[in-house]
Image: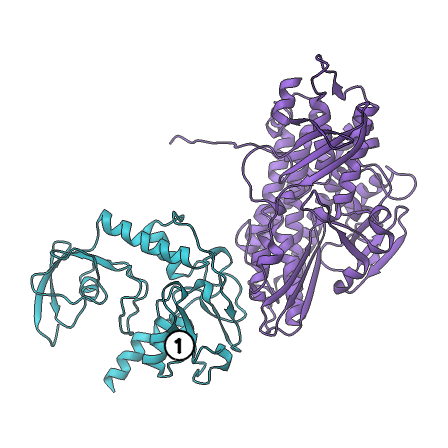
Amino acid sequence: MSGGRVITLTIDDRDCGAREEQTILEVARENGIFIPTLCHLGGLHPVGACRICIVDVEGIARPQPACVTRPVEGMRVATDSPGLRRQRRLILELMLAEGNHVCSVCVVNGHCELQELALQLGVDHLELPALYPRREVDASHPRFSLDRNRCVLCTRCVRVCSEIEGAHTWDVMGRGLASTVISDLNQPWGEAESCTTCGKCVQVCPTGALFDKGKAPGEMRKRHSFLPLLTAMREEE
Amino acid sequence: MATTISIDPVTRIEGHARISLYLDENHRVSDCRLHVTQFRGFEAFCRGRPLEEMPALTARTCGICPVSHLLASAKACDELLAVRIPPAAELLRRLLNYGQLVQSHALSFFHLASPDLLLGMDADPGQRNLFGVAAAMPEVARDGIALRRFGQQLIQRLAGKRIHPAWVVAGGVSRPLERKTGSIILAELPAMLTAARNNLARLQGVLENFQAEIASFANFPSGYLALAGTGGRPEYYDGPLRLLDQRGQELFSEPVAANYGHHLAEKVEPDSYLKSPYYRPLGPEEGMYRVGPLARLNAATACGTPTADEALAAFRELSSNGPVASSFHYHYARLIEIIHALEKIEELLGEEATYDCRVRATAGANAPEGTGICEAPRGTLIHHYRIDEQGLISGVNMIIATGHNNLAMNRGLLQASRAFIDDGDMALVAPTDQAAPPAIREGLLNRLEAVIRCYDPCLSCSTHALGQMPLAVELRRNSGEFIGRVTREMAANHD
C-alpha cells in the first residue's frame, strides 16, 4: 500500500486498511470480499450508473454505491443482507423490464455480464411488467452494430471512447425511459465522423448491445483484458 | 432422493386445434372445419432484426423441428450473404436434417400414432397412449424411445444441444465435425436400423385391420409437393421444388427457390390462423396438394439406399395406379423415411469430406432477398426474407409444412366424418332425451384426431400455450347454430 492517508474501516465485520482515494469496491476486492457490479470496469472512471454494487453503511439510511463511495475512518460497511439482495434484484429487474432482453437469440448468450448477474442474483423471472419498447437497431457501421434493445445505459462505451480512445463518439441523450446512447450528434453510427472504428466500445459493452457484425447468437465474446494493461502502460509513460 | 414425475396433459398432436362439424337437419355431416387457434406473429416481430439472428430466431417457431427452421432460414441467409457455403457445411447440414427426420418421425409414429395403430382406434382411451403401448408391446415403446433418442443425440453431438442449437449459421455451420463423434454415431446405427425395420414389418402386419380408415382418412386425389432429388430420389435439403398431379405427372419443377410464389398462392380463412397454400394456376379447390412423407415418396422413383428401396417397392404396391392416395399411409411412409435417413447418415459419416474443417463462408449483407427451402419432417418448408441496406430484416414470409397440408386436412376430416357419422354405425350416440343434443362416440372423436395425426401437423409451430388436450369437436347445424361440443374428457365419460 503506497501513497495517500491510510484509514481503517470494517467491511462485513472485517478490519480493512484503505487509502482515502480508493473506493469501497476497490478495498473490498483487495480483501477478497465480493460485491456484484455491472457498469463498473477496471481502467474506466466509475460513475455509479447501475447501482448494482450498493452496500449498507452504518449511520446512512440509504444504501450507497460501493464503486463511487470513498472509505472514511471508522466506517462500517455491510455488503450482503436480505435487504441488499432484494434491492439489487429489483434494480436488475427494472433494467430487464425496461429493454428487450431475449437471451436465447442474443449474440452474447452464455457470455453476457447481464445474464451472469441475473444468475448470481437469482433473477429467473420478472415480477414487474416488461415494457417491450420499440427500439431500432443501428447497423449502419460497416463492422459493428448497436442494438439499443439490449442497452442498460452503463455508459462503459461512452467512457472508454472518451477516456481511452479520446474520440468521444458516444454519449447519452434524453432522460428517464427515453435515455439512449447516441453517436456524434445523434447520427447513424456509420456516419459518425469521430468514430475511429477501434472497437473498444464493443469489447467493453457488458451485454449484446454492441457487437461485431456477422456474429450469430452466442458467438460474441467480449474481451476487455486490454483495458487495465492500456491504462497501466499509459500511467507509466 | 425422491423424484416427482408429472405428466401434464399429454396430447397426441403437436399444438392446439379445434374441429367444427356442421350437421344438417337429419344429423348428416354437411361440412367439417379445422381451426388452428393460435397466433404467433413471427413474420412481424422478425422485422428490424439483423439477418444473422434469423436462424436462431425462427428456430423458436418449433421445439420439435427447430432444425428444419434453422436450415431453411440459414439457406435464405446464405442467399442474403450471396455466398456458396463450403462443401463440408452442406454435408453437415444434411446430416443434421436426417437426424431430425429420425427423431421427429419416431415421435410421430411411436409416441403419437402407434397407440391407435397397435392397440386399435377403439381401445380404451386410458390405455391408448405410449404407456399403454409400453405395457402391451414393450419392445415397440423401447424402439420408439431409442430411435427418437438417437436422432436427438445426433443433433446434440453435431450442434451442441438438442433443441434450438445455434450451430447452423448464415454461411454454413459454426464448428466442424470431429471424427470420434462420427464414430460414436456410426456405432449406434445398426441397432437403430434393426429397430426401424422391425417396426415397419409390424405396421405392414396390422394394415389390414384398418381398411375402413385407409379408405376414408383423406383418401382422395391431390397434388404432391416436394423437393426433387437427382435420379428420382427423395431430397430433403436442396433441389428444385416440384409439384406432381394426382397421377404423378409433373406440374412444375422450379429450380430457383425465390420463384416459389409464381407457383404457390396462400388462401386466408376467416376461422383459422393457419393459411392454406395451393397451386396458383388451379385455385384452392383443384390446386390442393399434400406435402410430407407421403408426398416425398410418391414423388420419388427410388430412395438410393438398399433397405429403404426394398421398403419403397412394397409401399408402391399399395396403389396399382400411380401415387398412394390415402393419408393413412403417411405412417407407412414415415417409417420408410426413418430407414432411409439412417442409411443416409451412415453414408454421410463415411465420407471424408464431411470432416473437413472449412465449414463457414463469411460475408456481409450482399443481396436484397433470400429464399430457403428444405424438407422438414412434415413437408416442404419455405423461408423468404428481404433486408434493407444495413442487413436488417424488412420482410418475412414463412410457409410451414403444416400449412401446405391445411386444405387436405380439412377435406380429409370431412371425408372421415362423413364415413363414420353418415355411413358408419359408430357415429352419434342417440340422445335419450329429445331435447338433448346428439353426442359423439369417443371412437369417432379419436378417428377425427387420427386423420389429423396422419399428417403429424406441427400446430405447435404456432403456439406456446400450455394446458388442456387441444382437440375439441363442435357440432353445429347448417345455419351455424351451435348444438354441442365434445372434448376428450367429455367423450371418455360418454362411452
Q: Secondary structure at mark 1?
A: strand
Query: On screen, B381 above or below B394?
Result: above
Q: Is residue A158 visible?
A: yes
Which chain does tag 1 point to? A
Looking at the picture, tell me which residue is in the foreground, A49 or B211: A49
Residue tagged 1: A170
Query: On screen, B87 above or below A171?
Result: above
The x, y position of residue B234, in whole percent, is 78, 52
The x, y position of residue A69, in whole percent, is 19, 66
Q: Residue at (37%, 78%) from the top-left corner?
A: A161
Determine the image quadrant of residue B115: top right
Q: Colour of chain B?
A: purple
The x, y position of residue B177, in whole percent, is 58, 59
Q: Amino acid at mark 1?
A: Trp
B287 left or right of A24 in image: right
Quadrant that contains the N terminus of chain A: bottom left
Determine the image quadrant of residue B84: bottom right
Q: Is residue B228 visible?
A: no
Looking at the picture, tell me which residue is in the foreground, B203 or A35: A35
Q: Residue at (68%, 21%) from the top-left corner?
A: B123
Looking at the picture, tell me which residue is in the foreground, B279 or B365: B279
Quick one: which chain is cyan? A
